[in-house]
Image (cartoon, rainbow, N blue to C red):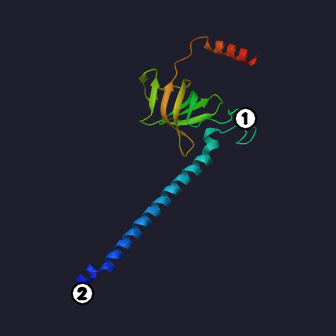
Amino acid sequence: MKTEEIFQSKILKVAAVALLCFIILGFVFGLGIYVGTKKADFSFKWADQYHRNFGGPQGGFFGEFTGTGDDFTNTNGVFGQIIKVDTGSITVKDKDNIEKIILVNNETSIVIQRKKIKLSDLKIGVYVIILGSPNSNGKIDGELIRVLPPAPSGFNNKRNTIQTNLNNL
């Protein structure tokens, strides 16, 4: 057989197409394994870091279950007081005294009333509402940080009186 006849034969063409299909299927299979491994790794790291970074329920997931739904911490945001400001992150203490780390980047909107401000403008002791999403390290990737204006004078006294009255009911 001549070389030209070999390259024009149907057997070679079928073998080449089969080899190409086998290579494509191998690539798709490998890509599926890669994506599945990354998803499993993300889930494992997030679950492994959950209690350390988010505080978790006080008595564990199944301890002291009261059925009120208040045992779990919110992982997609926080309302609380800034206790630390770093380059690229802030730490906020929420109503349950759980400290949460919020990562701040160029796409994070930091707003006070209608004015956008920078991370360097945030001060310790200021109250904020933060929306974001949890990452694989158990921290929150901040998307919106809303700085609350200071409470009017006497507000805490009125709030404490109202809370006391509600508790007495």
Q: CA distance from mark 1 to mark 2?
A: 82 Å
Residue 147: x and y in percent read: 50, 24
CB of mark 1 within 8 Å of CB of mark 2?
A: no
* Quarter of the view holding residue 71: top right
In the rendered image, the residue lying farthest to the front is 10
Residue at image location 34% in from the left, 74% down from the top: 16
The quadrant the C terminus occupies is top right
Residue 9 is left or right of residue 130, and the answer is left
* Quarter of the view holding residue 155: top right
Residue 13 is left or right of residue 162, and the answer is left
Categorize mark 2 by other alpha carbons within 10 Å: few (<14), some (14-19), many (20+).
few
Residue located beneath label 2 in the image? 2
> As shown in the figure, which amino acid type bears the numbered disc 1?
Gly
The quadrant the N terminus occupies is bottom left
Q: Which mark is residue 67?
A: 1
Q: Name the residue nearer the viewer: 116 or 162.
A: 162
Residue 64: x and y in percent read: 76, 38
Above-or-below relation of 49 to 9: above
What is the total number of numbered labels drawn onto the structure image?
2
Residue at image location 54% in from the left, 50% down from the top: 42
Residue 156: x and y in percent read: 63, 15
* Quarter of the view holding residue 26: bottom left
Q: Name the residue nearer the viewer: 5 or 30.
A: 5
